[in-house]
Image (tube, rainbow, N blue to C red):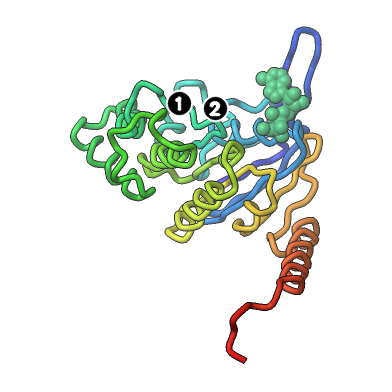
Amino acid sequence: MTIRIRQLTKVYKLGVERVHALRGVDLDIARNEFVAIMGASGSGKSTMMHILGCLDRPTSGVYELNGRPMHKMGAGQLARVRNEEIGFIFQSFELLNRATALKNVMLPMIYSRRHWATARKRARAALDRVGLGDRMGHKPNQLSGGQRQRVAVARALVNEPSILLADEPTGNLDSATTHEIIELFRQLHAEGQTIVIVTHEEEVAAHSQRIVRLRDGLVLSDHPTREDPTHRRWLEGQAAAAAEAAGSRPLAQGAPA
Ligand code: ADP
Ligand code: MG
């Protein structure tokens, strides 16, 4: 199992207040799965992604990544795992605005002390892979939203992580660009990448193999995408809308009699 989580909890302390963001989550994710995490705002999705991504630690419970106990590791060890095993993509891209696309993608390798020339070569390959081979010298403000998110995807991939985690990666993108990014994820998954993505949109989740829904810090449901009841209702709605649109479309003009 790539990811194994048992009775995971996270309690945030805010002064005297305690926020129970995760209340005992069990979850297994196998290599090469493409999983969508869904749930209302505040249900604990980002908290879970941060723990999966070793950006934060659970309050209690078990998190094993590739068989190693992350819940027992200290900050330094977690930083190393994060750099070597995890690619993380944020809704807000989190790029360095003063650095070119190439430099942004080289950063994780600089942290991992790879040779500069090797780092540059691999960053170029990663940018090529996401279709930005002709934009390597551009800074984030010289790129569209979709292109920025592609740079972030390239940065996430450059150390060949065992899991790619994306927290609402299309949340700041219009629908055409959302399509582009999702198509890229689909392609990465086809090439063998394990992917966990948080999304609000059924349209995005439609490309996953499995939907895990959270509510109030617990797993509410966990189904293959096509068997998820909420997703099925959405698909039926889409089909009905498409049929209606086809039915009401005026007949083609000038067609041969
Ligand atoms: P989601 O991503 O599903 O919207 P989050 O994981 O961000 O949910 O938040 C889950 C709960 O934890 C929410 O009630 C939120 O207010 C709270 N929370 C998240 N981060 C923090 C934090 N750093 N400190 C205190 N409470 C937090
Ligand atoms: Mg969130």
User: In screen coordinates, is 26 left or right of 177?
Assistant: right
- The amino acid at mark 1 is Ala
Dot 2 corresponds to which residue? 55
Residue at 62% x, 92% y is: 257
Whether residues under marks 2 and 1 lie with C-beta atoms below 8 angstroms apart, the answer is no
User: In screen coordinates, is 227 left or right of 160?
Assistant: right
Q: Is mark 1 within 8 Å of ligand 1?
A: no
Q: Secondary structure at mark 2?
A: loop
Residue 38 shows which numbered tag?
none
Residue 58, above or below 209? above
Instruction: Name the quadrant where ligand 1 sits.
Output: top right
Mark earlier in primary sequence (2, 1)? 2
Q: Farthest residue toward the front?
A: 254
Q: How many marks?
A: 2
Q: Position of residue 185 (x, y in %)?
A: 50, 52
> Within the image, what quadrant is residue 142 found in?
top left
Q: Is residue 29 visible?
A: yes
Q: Position of residue 124 (x, y in %)?
A: 27, 42
Q: Disc 2 and disc 1: Cα gap in Å?
A: 8 Å
Residue 68, above or below 110? below
Residue at 33% x, 24% y is: 99
Dot 1 corresponds to which residue? 79
Q: Secondary structure at mark 1?
A: helix
